[in-house]
Image (tube, coloured by chain):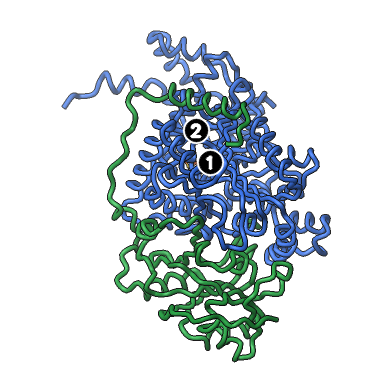
Amino acid sequence: MSARQPIDQFAASLPGDRRSSVLGSCQAATSKRLTALADDFAHADDLRRLAARIKQHTLDHLDTYLEAATARLEEQGVKVHFASEAEEARSLIHQILAERGAKRIVKAKSMVTEEIHLNDYLIDRGLECLETDLGEFIIQIDGDIPSHIIRPITHKNRREIAQSFEREGLGAYNDDPEVITRRARVHLRDRYMKSQAGITGANFVCADSGRIVLVTNEGNSRFSMAPNPLHIAVVGIEKIIPRDRDLGVFLNLLARSATGQRLTVYTEFLRGPKAPGQPSGPEEMHVVFLDNGRSRILGSDCREILRCIRCGACQNVCPVYRQASGHAYRSTYGGPIGAVLTPLLAGDDFAAFADLPKASSLCGACREVCPVDIPIPDMLLKLRHQAHDAGIRSPGAPPMAPFAELATRPVIWRGAMTLSRAANLVPTQLLPVPALQSWLKLRTLPHWRGGEFRQWMATRKKP
Amino acid sequence: MDGHPEEAMNRNDLFQKLRASAPASPEPYPDYDDAMLLSRTGHPTDLEASFRQQFTSINGYAFDSPGPLISLLRATANTRGYCDPALFPILGQPLADAGLEVSTLYHRSRYDDYQFGITRASGAIAETGTLILTDEQTSDRLAALSPWVHVAVLDPATIAPSIPEAIKRFGSSVNIIWVTGPSRTADVEGILIEGVHGPGVQVAYLSPVLSWTAPASPSF
Ligand code: SF4
């Protein structure tokens, strides 16, 4: 087999049943999204473009908005921290927990804590850190990593999950999704009630009100905060939006793009610790704003990628993601968003992920569905150039220099076109080239008609 | 801030980097009309009817008298529960009279004993069938979350027509939660299951009379 890029190698080795479960769930999610938007809005594209402009405006003034959000949060009694990279964020969070003697932690789903590998860090330091989103919980007990932003276990089937539950002592083997869910309910609520701190991400932070917005369907972020005294929200600095009012744009788009719902079941708006008199909820709230490469991306020509609201729609629609699945992207973010964000976040490690932007046919489907209209294909091209300029070679890529030579010399080109008609006389089915033969199994080579266009151009009658 | 010196440095560094990366021609804040955010159901004429319709379409139960609620609780074998003491006269009492066990105390250590929880809603959204709960008016966050059945007592006068309007009514609450249907997941093979961590059954109890009298306090 010829040399392949890492993502292609992974895709080629993906078991068939896994590929079909990823493909099926992506197709279903794509059509739900389409119906949810088209049924409800006559001009859904205008809404996407509006969302894009609001986010771009915020990014272009991020210093001002981040400062305003911080000031509001601090006024409301929230302790605000800044971490410039992953290690700093992890040790800061550990320190907050250690200072308060919190050892039993429950976590609501958050991509940014995945990005900084927070769980392992805290567990290595003797803390109990439990994922509470059903999918993330299964990922955690399996020692796996999420393969999709919204549906972390889209690569697993019910039989695998039932086996994991049995192994973990959560009941005898039963692969009924309802039974699996009920067992997780019982197991996790006991852990919520015994927890001493809850860690969440944030979907949005409104600069004008200092409101942190969190959405979950399961209610696990609510439960991660209700019984314990301490809440830590870990938030990428790009999550800011200017005003409460703008939530009307983003909440409508997020739920529909992510799961085809009109609103996510639980949409929580927090301005600080619980209200006086409220018996349940954190008395202390911390927000850790994380940079981790974002300010660098903001200074690059791919800054628009920071508009992303992590809906996963681009993953669902992407023909490459559908075949390769999320793990092929070898990072927290897979699919088109990951193909751009991962190499950018990698910074000095860019070369390790330079294959990702190449794994695209540039069909543009990702941009069409993106609720914040991110020009992902343009960015993939920019990153390909960056890899080229940095001299990073792609294994398996055919050498293009001979073609360039041919294509830039008209005389040689004309000659080659005429001569190549000889290809029609070659019995291609008999050529002992395995790659060609496997290609021909699925496709029929058309009759070669090289040079006819030139002839037609030269002889056509002008109107 | 906690006052750690590295944190102050990070903050200054970060803001400096952000200022340095500001583009030459920044995108202006777009001028938009909230009307473009309204979905197909965002222009309700009869707020209560629209709310009921949307709420029911996401598997919620809307009631306005104790009878159907009592039947539902009995039919689903959820006969022990909690009621916000302020709501006892209007709903707890009728349930207790019908033989259900109703407590006005929520003991955290017995969270599993509460099969239903009755708390107050601060409002609703007709466009999406959403219930709005706030820290200031929910007697206990856990009582609205841990029981299998959550009953939110809603004054129809507080229903907002649409999402933008509900946002305008945020006010100064420190904690607002919009609840749009029962807790749910589709993590296992995309199959929808209701009742993951929060309630599996969500009820809106529409009651226009919100002049509640002093609470009684029975307990089990
Ligand atoms: S890039 Fe766009 S479509 Fe993809 S996850 Fe982000 S917001 Fe969604």
Q: Which chain is blue?
A: A
Residue under the point 53% across and 51% down: A214
Q: Using residue A459 as the reference point, say whether residue A85 is left or right of it.
A: right
If you read the primary sequence from the N terminus, does the residue marked by circle 1 or circle 2 appear first?
Answer: 1
User: Residue B133: percent from the left, percent from the top?
Assistant: 50, 64
User: Residue B21: percent from the left, percent from the top?
Assistant: 44, 23
| Quarter placement of the C terminus of chain B | bottom right
Residue under the point 39% across and 32% down: A61
| Circle 1 crowding by C-alpha within 10 Å: few under 14, some 14–19, many from 20 | many
Q: Using residue B209 as the reference point, say whether residue A4 is left or right of it.
A: right
| Quarter placement of the N terminus of chain B | top right
Which residue in the structure is indicated by mark 2?
A361
Compared with A390, A19 (above or below) is below
Quadrant in which residue B209 is drawn: bottom left
Q: What kind of element bears circle 1?
A: helix
Quadrant in which residue B3 is drawn: top right
Which residue in the structure is indicated by mark 1?
A319
Q: Are marks 1 and 2 in contact (CB under 8 Å)?
A: yes
Give the colour in which the image draws chain B: green
Residue under the point 32% across and 68% down: B44
Compared with A280, A333 (above or below) is above
Q: What kind of element bears circle 2?
A: loop
Q: Write down the chain letter for disc 2.
A: A
Q: Using residue A463 as the reference point, say whether residue A120 is left or right of it.
A: right
At label 2, the amino acid type is Ser
User: Residue A211: percent from the left, percent from the top?
Assistant: 47, 48
| Circle 2 crowding by C-alpha within 10 Å: few under 14, some 14–19, many from 20 | few
Q: Using residue B218 as the reference point, say whether residue B90 is left or right of it.
A: left
**A237 or A451, which lies in front?**
A237
